[in-house]
Amino acid sequence: MIQPDICAPRELSNGALEDEIATLAAHIAAAEYRFLCLVAELDRRQVWAAHGLRSAAHWLAWRCGVGLNEGRLSFSKVRALTRVAAR
């Protein structure tokens, strides 16, 4: 079965393009929130220690390719972190 090209923005009208971008942004935000909730639980359980790692940050670097040297957070990421931390 031939897969349709999911990245064919030229075929979208301006309105459909705007709607698709807004929808995807909402999906990304929801996925990032879920990701942060799961990382918080992983850290709470100290799952990373079972692998001989020093922290959840090291586990994220090892398992998810998240760089240890990326220390900047956007406002939206800080807001998401505070939601998770407030649980």
Image (spheres, rainbow, N blue to C red):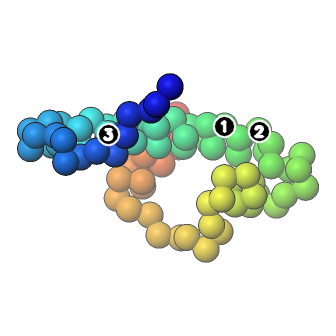
Residue at 34% of width from left, 59% of height from top? Answer: 75
Q: Amino acid at mark 1?
A: Glu
The single residue placed furthest to the top in the displayed view is 1
Furthest residue to the front?
Answer: 1
Q: Secondary structure at mark 1?
A: helix
Which of pointers 3 and 2 lies earlier in the amino acid sequence?
3
Closer to the camera in the image, 31 or 17: 17
Residue 27 location, quadrant? top left
Identified at 63% across, 43% down, the residue is: 39
Q: Which residue is label 2 attached to?
A: 45
Distance, label 3 to label 2, CA atoms, is 31 Å
Residue 71 x/y as whole percent = 53, 70
Question: CB atoms at circles 1 and 2 under 8 Å apart?
Answer: yes
Q: Nearer the viewer, residue 37 or 23?
A: 23
Nearer-the-camera pick, 80 or 87: 80
Going by the image, does 1 lie left or right of 43? left
Looking at the rendered structure, the secondary structure element under dot 3 is: helix
Residue 44 lies, in percent from the top left, at 71, 41
* Above or below, 78 relative to 4: below
x, y (%) of residue 15?
A: 9, 39
Residue appearing at x 61%, y 74% in the figure: 69
Where does label 1 land, which residue?
41
Q: Residue at x 46, y 31 (%)?
A: 2
Q: CA distance from mark 3 to mark 1?
A: 26 Å
Numbered circle sitting on residue 24: 3
Left or right of 59 on screen, residue 16: left
The residue type indicated by label 3 comes to Leu
Mark 3 or 1: the one toward you:
3
Estimate how packed mark 2 is, as few (under 14), some (14 to 19) or many (20 or more) residues with alpha carbons within 10 Å. few
